[in-house]
Image (cartoon, grey):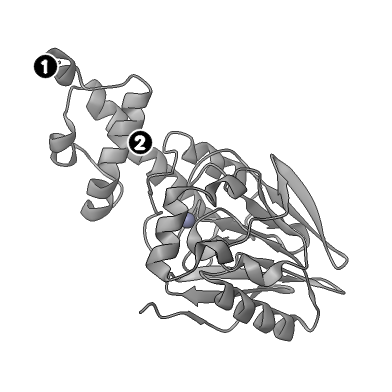
Amino acid sequence: MMQFSVGEFMPVADGAFVAVAEPDGVNIGLVVGPSGCLVIDTGSSPEQGLQIRREAERVAGAPVVGVLVTHWHHDHLFGLAAFTDVPSYAHETVPSWLGRPECSRAADELGVAVDALMAPTDTFALAKVIDVGGRRVEAIHFGRGHTDGDVVVVVPDASLIFTGDLLESVGPPDFGEDCHLREWPSAVDGILGLVAEETVLVPGHGAPMDRLAGFTQRAEISGLYGQAEFLVAQGVRLEDAYEAGEWPFDEATVRGALPLLYAQLAAEGKVPRTQLRLA
Ligand SMILES: [Zn+2]
């Protein structure tokens, strides 16, 4: 059985909090305005979503007036059914994931009924200004990266940014089948362009990050793709790539990401020349 739990909301900036929801250690954001609050990401099940909502309203001392989902992955989206009476914001690609096998598989693994999952109501392509009970928050999509629909939440008056899983501090970012490795660094550049010395970055998983940590991880993600691209150009085959490369992440992460890197490079017409000769 999966162990679902929600930790306490801890302050990260003026009128902003983060709680960690298990089983995936996902950061749940809370932004409190004068007469309402916004929850960022919803946990892994409708029941967990409800628990998050109750705790958020208790800490905020104000009703939830909106909820935002940073991307379609289960630990961010699956609690949305607890928020059907308020606007739910997400990138316009998010609803389409609900019908796909990847989503059903995740629900099965968690023991969550697929028909209990809800789609966000207020979707957008690029950006959205959200009125959080009199406090302005902005949500922005900087292009494809961790998924095709990552949204970053900016709280301008607190110099605070919720990055979703475009950045992670608990370990390396999660390079799943649905990520876009070539474009990911550009999406992080969007975030970094907004970051001042004092800005706090709340990643999708792990403790808050500063500007330097953001720049470092951007370089590592870019290095992973660049290294694979270089090896392919050198004719190094997938099975030899780990040994042949200089990698910015640990062995398990790199070995896990390599088939994806090679597949995404192949989709751009970049294949090792030795493989071409064999074909
Ligand atoms: Zn994710």
Q: Relative to the observer, which residue lies in front, 144 or 209? A: 144
Of marks 1 and 2, the one in the foreground: 1
Find disc 1 in the rendering and name its residue. 278
C-beta proximity under 8 Å, tags 1 and 2? no
Location of residue 38 in the rendering, given as x and y in whole percent from the top left corner = 73, 67
Q: Is residue 163 above or below residue 266?
A: below
Q: Left of 182 or right of it: where is 71?
A: right
Q: Which image quarter is the C terminus in?
A: top left
Residue type (three-letter) at the residue carrying disc 2 = Tyr
User: Which quadrant of the figure has residue 83?
Assistant: bottom right
Separation (CA) of disc 1 from disc 2: 25 Å
Neighbours of disc 2 within 10 Å: few (<14), some (14-19), many (20+) = many
Residue type (three-letter) at the residue carrying disc 1 = Leu
Seen at 50% across and 42% down, the residue is: 145
Does residue 271 appear in the picture of this structure? yes
Q: Relative to the observer, which residue lies in front, 94 or 101? A: 101
Location of residue 204 in the rendering, given as x and y in whole percent from the top left corner = 51, 61
Find disc 2 in the rendering and name its residue. 225
Seen at 49% across and 61% down, the residue is: 74
